[in-house]
Image: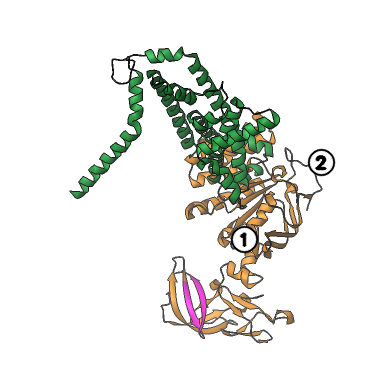
Chain colours: A green, B orange
Amino acid sequence: MKRGAFHRSLTLFWWVVMAFLYLPLAVIVFYSFNSANSSAYFAGFSLRWYDKLIHNDQLLDALGNTLVLGITSSLLALVIGTLIGYGMYRHRARKLGWLIVLIYLPIVMPDIVFGISEMAFFISIDRQFGILGPSLLTMIIAHVTFQIPFVALIVYSRFVGLDPTLFEAAKDLYASPFQRARFFLLPTLKPSLIAAFFLSFTLSVDDFVISFFNAGPENATLPIYIWGAIRRGVSPEINAIATLMIGAVLIAAILSLLFNRQKQH
Amino acid sequence: MTVPPSAEPDAAGTQRVRDASAIALRNLHKRFGRDAVALDGVDLDIHAGEFFTLLGPSGCGKTTLLRILAGLEAPNEGTLTIGGKDVTTTPPHLRSVNTVFQSYALFPHLSVHDNIAFGLRMKGVAAAERERRVQEIADFIKLGALMERRVNQLSGGQRQRVALARALVCEPDVLLLDEPLSALDAGLRNQLQVELQRTQKRLGMTFVFVTHDQEEAMVMSDRIAVLDGGVIQQVGPPQTVYEHPVNAFVARFMGHVNLFEIGSVNGDRVTTALGQLRLEQPLAEHERHGMLLIRQEVIELGPEVPEGYNALQGVVRERLYRGSRVEYRLEVDGVVLLATASNLGQRLHAVGDRVTVSICPEDIVRLDA
């Protein structure tokens, strides 16, 4: 009897948490299909905000920037992070204590600290040498920096989960160092690499703070554009953008999860 | 015995003389870190086409020795030659040696077929030839139905077969086996012991097998090397190592328990804790120390003492009935003596019975402590 009540209240709690997490998103998605000019009331189903959206050049530029930034930085982070993850695995017997902390620090570092210090760093280099002024390049560098630890972590944990004798078996079966990379390491890592790419991409698309501090005037990403737009009032158009972004991030996150799960077997 | 190096280093190994598989180890030393000694001066010759077993407890250096043969570990000192070629510093992928690992180490991202083909692919064997050889070995090891399976869909015994096939298909000069049966249950293990031994005989390939199980070693091997503390204690055919162990360690490791220190010696009479025993012949001057071994199965229990046998009086303290044989724990002069009798339907002795113990002088073996 008592137990039943306890379980019911747990279930209720679960739904409260879910509502807390997802209701705001649902509201945004809902009003993105609203035909009215305001989100104060629902006037009927319409795709007019989506239509407006695809004719908004500024927004399309921002979308383009986001994609270029996300894909480029993720690919770069993938290469560097994989090398770091492999190195961490190869030398796991040594005490790498501080090195590991330094690699993982960006994960827990507040974005604002990260963003501002990168900005200060780039500006001082720009003053000295006239390179690395705020641009897409500085944004890519900044993003790669915070994506690397995630990639390294995923790759490292994949290696740690492997039977260490597999590396020896590859040597024993006549594979040269290059062949070991090509026919053993890469195929074994593939699901993890795909998962790491989608995770990095999601992080990049999601990022506002670090992008904001390192962007040049031409390089507004979607989050930056939205932030600017909201200062002029919440237009239902923002709802439509947000809905599209939710969809994209959801798909990337699901793909990342699927590939990460596939590697388990 | 060893053949001069044939033409050039043949990692590709299309043609090979079986004699290229004779192995010579000279003064091998291996240390891990500063003071962990794994091998302490190993000299060993393994003949071409031999089933050779490295036997010893864990930490005796047998696995290190195997890894040096494979090239996965480099000795600190000493040389290793295979087929007359010095391969001490040759990396593993350039050695015509393959290993069946204890964990099998099958590639999880590849099918059974691709696992088996891996070595040939890395060596650059042409696709048609590769296919033919993979098929051949699959038929030989009877893997037909499993070829397209993923590794994680296989049972332990099947994995073991695939690991064997993957190594054999490369036709190495030497095949190394690192306790490949230890993860399997007893029945399957016995079956695979026989299969492995047959395979080796049919192929005439040199097998170097590592195990800590002395029965497994005796069943399968042409010769056994018993290791302890990084040193080879004894090398010989199973029967020699079992019946004439050179020292107490080998004797105990081979399963013997009745070891008695040699006390005073008077010609062919030796005093031990059991009492005075007569040997087949007097001990030479340099043999008058160490121990005497009386194997459990040579001890006879019965009222009559055969002519010329040592006779002792004992009491049965424990009886273990094992079906085909019966083990008695006897007490002789306050000393424990174990005796095993074949179960031939004779009347069994009961706990508490007084028995006469007869030991043939020929069956008493002297060995070093």
Q: Is A85 inside the magenta-drawn segment?
A: no
Q: Are marks 1 and 2 on the same chain?
A: yes
Query: Is residue A21 or residue B45 the one in the foreground?
Result: A21
Which mark is drawn over residue B17? none
Where residue B337 sits: x, y (%)?
A: 52, 78
Question: Gap in Å between the C-alphas at discs 1 and 2?
Answer: 35 Å
Q: Secondary structure at mark 1?
A: strand
Chain part drawn in magenta: B327-352
Task: Answer whether residue B132 is visible to the viewer in this image.
Answer: no
Task: Please check the rendered image and state whether residue B341 is part of the magenta-colored stretch, yes or no.
Answer: yes
A221 vs B231, nearest the viewer: A221
Residue at image position (62%, 52%) is: A94
Q: Residues within 10 Å of mark 2 (few under 14, many from 20)?
A: few
> Quick check: A221 above or below A57?
below
Determine the secondary structure under disc 2: loop
Residue A13 visible, this angle:
yes
- Residue, disc 1: B55
Query: Which residue is labeled 2 in the image?
Result: B7
- Against A120, residue B44 (above or below) is below
| Image x and y of residue B338, in percent | 51, 75
> Image check: A167 left or right of B313?
right
Displayed quadrant of residue A28: top left
Q: Quadrant of the C terminus of chain B?
A: bottom right
**The residue marked by circle 1 belongs to what chain?**
B
Quarter location, residue A68 = top right
Amino acid type, mark 1: Leu
In screen coordinates, is B279 left or right of B5? left
- Foreground residue, B264 or A180? A180
Total tally of numbered discs in the picture:
2
As drawn, A82 above or below B369: above
Residue A132 position (above or below residue A93): above
